[in-house]
Amino acid sequence: MDELTHGEVRRLFDYDSALGILRWKVRVRRSWAPGSIAGSERSSKGYGQVGIRRRYYRLHQLVWFWVYGEWPVGELDHIDRDPTNNRIENLRVATDSQQSANRGNTRPGRLKGAYERKGKWRSGIRVDGMRKWLGTFDTEEEAHEAYGRAAREHFGEYACLG
């Protein structure tokens, strides 16, 4: 199956940059009228997607392609971590490691990068698939601060401390 061309994507969709949505320009299916919002389907990770020629495309990748005329090299990261916000200024190319750094805290009620073992707080960070030990601390806040320093050092603008 052939990859979509930039011309085809521009023929099929209009991009509303203020809302970050694609709208159909042509009728592809009976239920998809011109002007209707494309991509009612959601992947398991919450990304919008649309089926074109028996293949699903993620909306944020189509938006990138629509704007820049080339498919993203690598993964696309939503800066605000909202997979429904496909405004072009909210999208950036990222490595797997950078995307992981931009994930929010997965343990509610805990500070990111801090975990407790035997009455002490420990911290570590994963960089390019390798675990880096940051130390043992008396408080959860100290462990989190160590994580924050390391995350900013290794990931810069991609570092998410929340």
Image: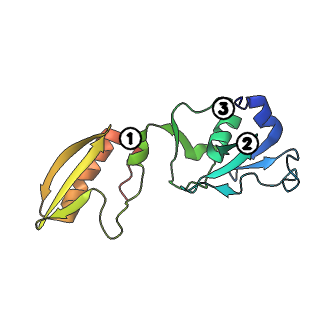
Q: Earlier in the sequence, mark 2 or mark 3?
A: 2
How far is mark 3 from mark 1, CA to CA?
24 Å
Quadrant of the rendered image containing residue 30: bottom right
Mark 3 lies on a secondary structure that is: helix
The residue beneath circle 1 is 97
Tell me where residue 58 appears, x and y as whole percent: 63, 45
Tell me where residue 139 appears, x and y as whole percent: 16, 65
Q: Earlier in the sequence, mark 3 or mark 1?
A: 3
Nearer to us of marks 2 and 1 is 2
Residue type at numbered disc 3 = Tyr
The residue beneath circle 2 is 54
Residue type at numbered disc 1 = Ser
Nearer to us of marks 2 and 3 is 2
Q: Earlier in the sequence, mark 2 or mark 1?
A: 2
Tell me where residue 71 appears, x and y as whole percent: 62, 32
The residue beneath circle 3 is 68
Nearer to us of marks 3 and 1 is 1
Mark 2 lies on a secondary structure that is: loop
